[in-house]
Amino acid sequence: MAPPRRHVRSPPLVCSPRVSVDSAVSPTIDAVLKQLKTCSRRLQAALACHRTELQVLERLYYKGKNQHRTALFWQRVAEMRKFGGRVDEMHMDDVVESLRLAFWGEPSSRTPKLLKGPWTHCPDVKPLLFVMERCSACCMLIDRARERLLHAYESFTLMMQTGAFLQLVLAFAAIASRLSILLSEVRAALEVSWSATHRALQALFPAEVRKVQNLVKVVDTDTAAPTPAVPPSTSHSKSPRAVPGPGDVQDEDLGSALARPPPPPEAPEENIDAFDADATALSLPDGNSEQPPGDPMTFSLSTELAQPIVPQVGRGTCEGTPVPSAANAPKRKKTVGESSRPAKKKKKKRDEIDDIFGF
């Protein structure tokens, strides 16, 4: 039994001429077609890169399937491959482009020259509802795929810490990150396509707008309301911690300023020349003046300045007798008996040949 087709066929196209549409909605349709053309090109570029990443993932999967199929991280690789294939099988770029081309009539009557001109036909309500439903379903699938890609990336990061199969695991982590970025671009283009199709539905078939469900918006972590603080528990949760946004980070506590007393005033600098003159005058007492005997243990700055500076001599005895250094010490002369001692003769080494011939 053949597996079911994941690509849903579009409903049959039924078009009516442009003259049957009110001329007041023509500017709205022109703006919608311009948005659909831009979204179609964005989807083609993003999904082309997505298919390239899936091809690289497919090669690595079949290369290491037999060796790593029982490993835990290989289950994450299988999930990446499964969700990537499901997104690629939807062919959302062709779905959006087919809706845009439906405003130029049947595929058999379209020519490159006709597509360069204004739109000539108006499709019925079924293609519009079909495109909106496929955009909504693909957005839900992308949200689920990005969630699994995040868990796979965390698993690969933990696997890299062990150092086992580092090159292979690093390649899988890079592919998971790349696929998540591409899927976010695809989802943004699908949101614009859904809103453009919704505007066309409001302009052409206002009664059918009630049957359409609103598109599920992705929750942005930066604009989400902050959650209340939860007290820490002893059990560790397996879910990753939420990274705080730029606005959630509190200012650093720098403390409060302390009032410190002013520093004491510095002592004024004295004139050195005048100080020397006063010291000289104190060191030379007058014959008529009598000074009381001072305490020999009392330190006097003038007395120290008046004393002559005696250069310090090298180490010696208490009387200041210098000790001759090793370099200036006289060398001992050799005696006659020591110089006339005969030198030892070097004994010649004998080998086996000398023993044989008697040398």
Image (spheres, helix red, strand yellow):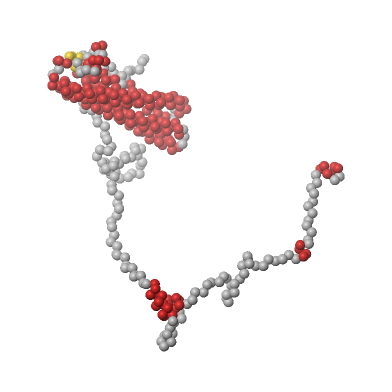
**Figure disc tally:** 0
At which x and y percent is residue 231?
A: 30, 45
> Which quadrant: the N terminus?
top left
Kindly identify the residue that appears in the image at 63 percent across and 67 percent down: 328
Q: In terms of depth relative to the viewer, which is nearer, 358 or 94?
A: 358
> Which residue of the protein is positioned furthest toward the bottom in this rendering?
288
Q: In terms of depth relative to the viewer, which is nearer, 188 or 331?
A: 331
Q: Is residue 315 left or right of residue 359?
A: left
Q: Is residue 337 above or below residue 351?
A: below
Name which quarter of the figure residue 59 lies in: top left
At which x and y percent is residue 281?
A: 41, 80
Q: Is residue 255 above or below residue 334?
A: above
Residue 144 in view here: no
At which x and y percent is residue 113?
A: 25, 15
Kindly identify the residue that appears in the image at 42 percent across and 33 percent down: 170
> Which residue of the protein is positioned furthest toward the top in this rendering?
108
Q: Is residue 197 above or below residue 73?
A: above
Name which quarter of the figure residue 181 lies in: top left
Residue 344 in view here: yes
Q: Is residue 172 left or right of residue 11?
A: right
Kindly identify the residue that appears in the image at 57 percent across and 70 percent down: 314
Q: Is residue 77 left or right of residue 321?
A: left
> Which quadrant: the C terminus?
top right
At which x and y percent is residue 217?
A: 24, 31
Kindly identify the residue that appears in the image at 30 percent across and 53 percent down: 254
